[in-house]
Image (cartoon, rainbow, N blue to C red):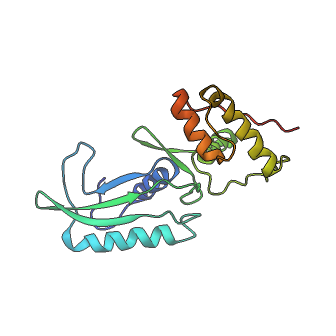
């Protein structure tokens, strides 16, 4: 991406779209065709500061995306690498949400597209998901007894004394003797 002394708006649109998709690396000083034009050496630190200042500004980004920046020298030219990790939040730059599709930063418009973005993020990340409390009606002792009897049945023909074995030992022995892991299904009665 071209960048002389300060990052342009398209840099921040790309940061926003990377954060809304699967993250990525943005190389300032590398042209679209892959040739290295570089950034002025003295401007590299200011470019990095400018990026952090803009993404931290609540008037620019609704939520500040996490980024890491570094200056790298490639073939005698200075390139600024901006790494944007994937994240569960949905980001907007100047009130517009961008998504990365192929090699383009695409504006997310309409309720349907925004819903799909939220659904995709929800399916990829579970940090903000609330799972309902699951109650088990079967007591631990009864559950242990049912597991033990299920595991003992394939072992009966080998006449092993399994009466005092813990379920974990029964499970291991059953899988060794039969060559498969037993499928356990507990029914709530």
Give the image location of residue 46, x and y in percent. 31, 74
Place of residue 65 in the rendered image (x, y in percent of width and height, measured from the top left): 50, 63
Q: Position of residue 184 (x, y in %)?
A: 69, 34
The answer to which of 24 and 182 lies nearer the viewer is: 182
Apparent side of residue 143 relative to residue 79 in the rendered image (left or right): right
Report the residue that reaches farthest toward the left. 76
Q: Is residue 49 above or below residue 174?
A: below
Tally of numbered tags: 0
Name the residue: 50% across, 47% down. 21
Q: Quadrant of residue 104?
A: top left
Quadrant that contains the C terminus: top right
Q: Tell me the residue at 64%/39% (across/down).
A: 161
Outermost residue, top side: 157
Residue 28 in the figure: left or right of residue 95:
left
Residue nearer the viewer, 156 or 33: 156
Q: Can residue 126 be seen at all in this image of the molecule?
A: yes
Q: Is residue 120 visible?
A: no
Residue 157 at x, y percent in the picture: 63, 25
Point 83% across, 50% down: residue: 139
Residue 48 found in image quarter? bottom left
11 versus 45 height, above or below: above
What residue is at 29 percent from the left and 66 percent from the top? 70
């Amino acid at each position: 991406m071209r960048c002389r002394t300060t990052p342009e708006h398209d840099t921040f649109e790309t940061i926003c779209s990377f954060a809304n998709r699967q993250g990525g690396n943005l190389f300032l000083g590398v042209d679209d065709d892959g040739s290295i034009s570089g950034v002025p050496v003295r401007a590299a630190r200011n470019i990095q500061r400018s990026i952090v200042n803009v993404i931290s500004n609540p008037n620019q980004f609704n939520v500040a995306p996490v980024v890491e920046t570094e200056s790298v020298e490639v073939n005698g030219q200075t390139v600024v690498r901006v790494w944007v990790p994937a994240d569960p939040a949905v980001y907007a730059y100047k009130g517009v949400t961008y998504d990365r599709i192929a090699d383009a930063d695409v504006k997310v418009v309409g309720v349907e597209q925004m819903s799909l973005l939220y659904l995709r993020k929800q399916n990829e990340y579970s940090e903000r998901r609330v799972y309902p409390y699951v109650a088990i009606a079967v007591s631990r002792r009864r559950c242990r007894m049912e597991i033990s009897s299920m595991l003992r049945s394939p072992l009966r023909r080998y006449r092993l004394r399994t009466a005092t074995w813990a379920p974990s030992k029964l499970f291991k022995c059953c899988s060794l003797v039969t060559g498969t892991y037993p499928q356990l299904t507990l029914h709530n009665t």
